[in-house]
Image: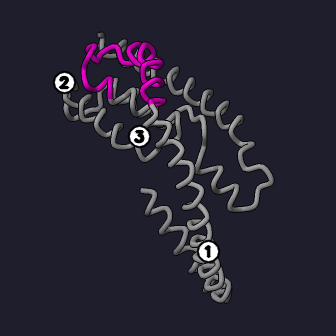
């Protein structure tokens, strides 16, 4: 769907530029946009490599395992339908810990594994279970301690203090995660009432 929206925006822009005789502006914007994209990408590579390396050291040093143990009781309350000791819980905790530490690359495969394990517990294979919806909501709104991508973009565009976004990002992600959990609980309770469970 998003691809169709982008295609519509691009084509409508070209058509209106052609009607108004401003195709030169379109050509210039295309080349300048491509140039900016390449510049930003190269700037991001160095900063992201540094931060992901730091996070990988933290992971190998055991910080991820400590965080996983710390959030264990919370995860078990958020996913009451998942039996204790099930592999899904381990993947969920690892996914959440990696997201908190800004390890997006490490979080994605763990999230996929968690979804696969939750699908095994899902009685209706054609619909997402409540636990799967909860994981998606929390994963999307995840609390983030170090927003590496945002820091990299700010550094690339010459921000005076690129890391001053950390505090507000942490606050924003705490609020978004809390709101996601509340909404998930509300939809889950509403669905239980409507299904008579």
In the depicted view, which residue is nearer to us: 57 or 85? 57
Magenta part, dominant SS: helix
**Magenta stretch in the rendered image:** 62-90
| Closer to viewer: mark 2 or mark 3 | 3
Is 76 a magenta residue? Answer: yes
Q: Which residue is mark 1?
A: 33
- Contact (Cβ within 8 Å) of mark 1 with mark 2: no
Residue 69, percent across and down?
A: 42, 19
187 is higher (above) or lower (below) than 42: above
Q: Residue at x 57, y 79 (%)?
A: 14
> Quadrant location of residue 19?
bottom right
Q: Which residue is mark 3?
A: 107
Which residue in the rendered view is the most extreme toward the right? 160
The CA span between labels 2 and 3 is: 26 Å
Q: Which residue is mark 2?
A: 123
Q: Residue at x 57, y 68 (%)?
A: 42
Q: In this rendering, does residue 190 appear at all?
A: no
- Contact (Cβ within 8 Å) of mark 3 with mark 1: no
Q: Residue at x 63, y 50 (%)?
A: 150
| Dot 1 crowding, Cα within 10 Å, few <14, some 14–19, many 20+ | few
Residue 2, percent across and down?
A: 46, 57
Which residue in the rendered view is the most extreme toward the front? 61
Residue 173, percent across and down?
A: 60, 33
In the depicted view, which residue is nearer to us: 7 or 73? 73
Q: Residue at x 65, y 50 (%)?
A: 151
> Quadrant location of residue 12?
bottom right
194 is higher (above) or lower (below) than 139: above
Residue 13, label in figure? none
> Quadrant location of residue 196?
top left
- Contact (Cβ within 8 Å) of mark 2 with mark 3: no
């Amino acid at each position: 769907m998003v691809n169709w929206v982008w295609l519509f925006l691009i084509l409508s822009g070209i058509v209106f530029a052609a009607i108004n005789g401003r195709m030169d502006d379109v050509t210039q914007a295309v080349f300048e946009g491509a140039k900016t994209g390449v510049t930003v990408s190269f700037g991001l590579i160095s900063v992201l490599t540094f931060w992901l390396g730091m996070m990988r050291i933290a992971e190998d040093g055991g910080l991820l395992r400590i965080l996983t143990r710390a959030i264990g009781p919370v995860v078990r309350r958020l996913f009451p339908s998942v039996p204790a000791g099930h592999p899904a819980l381990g993947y969920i905790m690892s996914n959440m810990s990696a997201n908190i530490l800004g390890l997006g690359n490490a979080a994605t495969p763990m999230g996929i594994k968690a979804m696969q394990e939750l699908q095994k517990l899902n009685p209706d294979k054609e619909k997402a279970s409540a636990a799967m919806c909860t994981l998606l909501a929390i994963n999307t709104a995840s609390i983030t301690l170090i927003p590496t991508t945002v820091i990299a973009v700010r550094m690339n565009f010459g921000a005076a203090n690129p890391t001053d976004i950390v505090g507000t990002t942490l606050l924003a992600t705490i609020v978004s995660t809390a709101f996601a959990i509340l909404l998930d609980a509300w939809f889950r309770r509403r669905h239980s009432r409507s299904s008579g469970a």
